[in-house]
Amino acid sequence: MVCALSRLPPEILPVIFELLDGQSILRCSAVCRGWRSIVSSSTEMHYLVELWADGLEPGHSLGRSSAEKLQRLLDWRQAWATLNWSATSDFPITEHPRAYELVGGVFAQHNTWPRSDFSTLRLPGVDAPQAQAMTRESVGVSSLDFAMDPTQDLVVFLYKVEFWSETGNFDIRSLSTLEPHPLAAHPTLSFDLRDDAFRRIFLQVADDVIGLLFRTSQVAEGSLRLVLFNWRTGTALLDLTGPELPHSISDFALLSPRSYILASVNVQSYIPGHGMHRGTGELHLYAFDGTRRNTDPDHIASLQLPAPHPGRLLERVIVHSGPFCAGLVPGAQFVKSNARRICVISLAYDRMESYSLYMHHAFFERCIQQRTADADADTNTDAVRAPVVPWGDWGPHNTRLLRGRHVFWLRYVHGERVVSPVDAACPYRIEVLDFGIFLRRTDPDQEDVFLGPSTISSASTVFKQDVVTCLPYRRITRDLDQRHILYLIDQDRLIGVNEMNRSTD
């Protein structure tokens, strides 16, 4: 049977195909010889397919032809595969900022002493070789933290008007002017603290949602609070306190504008068929409505982490992934898809033993989709109550567990890449772990590629049983000329912070 689209004039089909994403173009090429010929003869479609293979989406054309865009992409891919950067730059930064961020090619830092200044640095890159720096001597408030998204020209400052105030505030501002953001229905969003203290702040933004987890006391479990706002409409989406949250919460992460994770050390957890276990640790996945006021979140699942030996203790779980950018990065030919991001779960145990667990955001999205399908199929809410999923049922085939790499700073993850020092024995060596490899194009015999399972033995580690994980990745290393105290990463740059020189490279 002849496809109806094949009856179109021959010059129309290429125009239609070029409106598709790379994966859809590949599927079209498998329909018939004629369509395959159309795809294979188009440089623009080749470019779109290569973007999809790298988990990228088209950005600004920058006046380049299809061939020039394709070559730019291939050069970018090769540079990351070899850590062969095209240029280096040095910039001074404040030695100990109150807070900093790196999103969409912009590095920002905020200080509260001796003055409340806020500075941004649009970093140079291949497509924009000139840096742009801007400093405001005062933002008008004594901010406790901030979050930003340059693709929305957005910065959010968290503050209290007075030290003893029991009201928290979000100022919603333009990143470029620090004036009230034009898309915000209300320039300031306030919430009751129910205390005058503000401790252990976790502030994040994803598209139209602001998320904040904090404590008002370092002692009481019930003092933990989670608040979510839609900053555009001013709607208070969630306001949950300790009794409404899982036990022993250690960290919070907005996965998307409609989902989040709470990480728990879970001092006592129940494993079906095995009873209570101490310090197993769990990842609690939730979805929520981003438009309605104070609705209960949907608890999707509680994913259990590998069980430790009896008597060993999981002290902290930290969740970190790259920023969620709502729009295109200014001046970028392509941008990383928000759907193609890696999540790093840092596990800190007693006796200074630590591990990092790597997993794709797509796994969480599949859990949410499955939960939605189950709920649609069964109107009995008890039948679709959030399951507690043992490690063996989800972890081995969806994650990779590696020793050490307990990183305490922000923005060491972007997309599917993770940057860190190798270890103390190699202070001048840097490594990048890339979990975005395309398996069909990967040579399994390459020394830097890890496709098969790896095992963390229970014999000499914290774990009760051998932990086997299988998520494929590539490990790239390079020796540097100088030592840095921490590393940051974004789509086009590696940044080393050097305390001695007080600069970023």
Image (cartoon, rainbow, N blue to C red):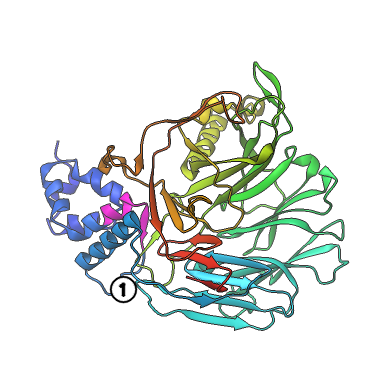
Q: Secondary structure under badge 1?
A: loop
Give the magenta range: 48-58
Specify whether residue 488 is in view: yes
Front residue of this view, candidates 275 and 371: 275
Specify whether residue 264 is in view: no
Front residue of this view, candidates 495 and 209: 495
Identify residue type, mark 1: Leu
In the image, residue 274 sits, relative to residue 353, either above or below, namely above
Q: In the rendered image, which quarter contains the N terminus?
A: top left
In the image, residue 120 sits, relative to residue 191, either above or below, namely below
* Residue located farthest toward the front when viewing the structure as drawn: 425
Where residue 398 sits: x, y (%)?
A: 47, 35
* Residue located farthest toward the top when viewing the structure as drawn: 273
Where residue 347 sits: x, y (%)?
A: 61, 41
Residue at image location 36% in from the left, 65% down from the top: 59
Q: Is residue 371 left or right of residue 350?
A: left
Residue that numbered label 1 is attached to:
62
Sort mark 1 into few (<14), some (14-19) or many (20+) by Cα contacts within 10 Å.
few
On the image, which quarter does residue 86 sit in? bottom left
Front residue of this view, candidates 62 and 29: 62
Residue at image location 68% in from the left, 38% down from the top: 351
Where residue 490 sits: x, y (%)?
A: 46, 61
Residue at image location 65% in from the left, 48% down from the top: 252
Front residue of this view, candidates 400 and 17: 400
